[in-house]
Image (cartoon, rainbow, N blue to C red):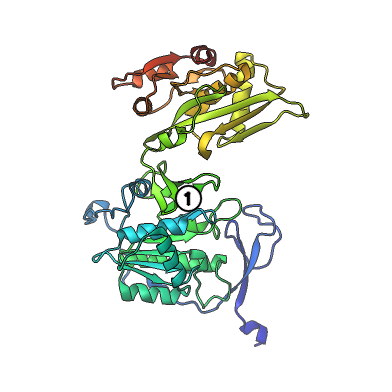
Amino acid sequence: MSVKAKKDRVQYTCQSCGHVSPRWMGHCSECNEWNSYVEEVVPKKHAKTARQQSETPSVAVHLSDIDFKHQERISARSKEFNRVLGGGVVPGSVVLLGGDPGIGKSTLMLQEGVGLANEHFPVLFVSGEESIRQTKLRADRLGINSGHLYVLAETNMSEILARIEQLNPKLVIVDSIQTVYRPEFESSPGSISQVRNCAYEFIECAKKQNVPIFLVGHVTKEGYIAGPKVLEHMVDVLLQFEGDRDHFYRILRSIKNRFGSTREIGVFEMTQKGLEEVLNPSSLFLEQRKENVTGSCVICTMEGTRPFLVEIQALVSSANFGLPQRTATGIDNKRLSLLLAVLEKRVGLRIGGQDVFVNAAGGVRIDEPAADLGILVSIASSFKDQIVDPRAVIIGEVGLGGEIRTIPQIDKRIDEATKLGFKRAVIPKLSQKGIKSQSSLKISCVDNVEEALEEVLN
């Protein structure tokens, strides 16, 4: 047998989709990405997993015969964190938290870990990116401390599992999954094989010991979780920590949740003492609003079960430098183009030669169609140089025919506007029947865009 045959097998794995090929390929046939394959050395002998070592065969049972007692969720330090998780941390679950560098992932996890740690609830914080002293320095800066939170600066998977078995914590935080490695694999930490196998072992540990594990994950320049896409499918909950360096608030968004809604978000504010939860985000987004300015109006959008009041700003000016610009911040550019076409075709506003800039104030991202009418009103306000009623909240989805379509959960939106002192609401005519509670707001029901503009423009 030749020396070459005794060597470990080499395979090539696509970093985008995880497709495995026996040879290098410049173009991935699965996801159509170029130059995405990396070389990985696969040992011939792999350590058997706990599932392979088990001698007890699996048995299929009737769903009605499964004996299950309801498990109480673990209440986290902040209400916003509990909201996004669906009511608290589920024992035995694996949560993956991703976000841009410096957004506050480690700060959030350290704060939540300290908030949960007590005599009967020890927490293990595994730091693969910082030393023990650096973690202590971060805790001192945040003004937090706990005698029941253990800090482990380790990246070897075997050592981490040994410490988990030794300490028997009630919660494990790993910062981050890209730094953990298995010495059996010759690939470097953060590679597809390392991330996939280490995450699988953490999942096995969580299910076997019924301990929740939080994994902090890096993101690529496109904003996706670094590593194989299968990592997102393996975990129970996928959270995205979003924010803008130019603003002090952060948004924790649920992308995947096997135990709750994926439409919930939590709002935090970055302060000198770390992340503080924001219980009334609407007032935060509207606190710097100027009322007597054209191109400004307030909309109400829903994130899960929570209504948000957000200011939409628009600026329309003559295009003096060739092709007119269409720029949107916090709003989908394609949606803006569609709404501008409706405004020009159905209302008759000639804005084809104008520069149009639209911004969701505060840097919040709006994806709900119920914001359509507010966007059109703010654009028309700037174009006509007319002020929108400052005490009105505008809600409605716009169709291609210029009609205003009905929207869900109109009751919650009106209640939120009433709490913040608004006097008027412009809503779709078909949504009027969804109003069940009594409100002091003056309700204006409109059927198309032209009616809405007549109602709110002074």
Q: Position of residue 57 (x, y in %)?
A: 32, 69
Q: SS class of the residue under badge 1?
A: strand
Query: Which residue is nearer to you in this view: 290 or 299?
Result: 290
- The number of numbered discs placed on residues in the rendered structure image is 1
Q: Amino acid at mark 1?
A: Gln
Q: Which of the 4 image quarters holds residue 205? A: bottom left
Q: Residue at x 23, y 65 (%)?
A: 120
Q: Residue at x 39, y 49 (%)?
A: 276
Q: On screen, 428 above or below 337?
A: above
- Which quadrant would the N terminus be assigned to in this image? bottom right
Q: Which class describes the residues within 10 Å of circle 1: few (<14), some (14-19), or many (20+)?
A: many
Q: Position of residue 62 (x, y in %)?
A: 26, 54
Q: Position of residue 274 (x, y in %)?
A: 42, 54
Q: On screen, 79 above or below 310?
A: below
Disc 1 target residue = 240
Q: Which of the 4 image quarters holds residue 402? A: top right
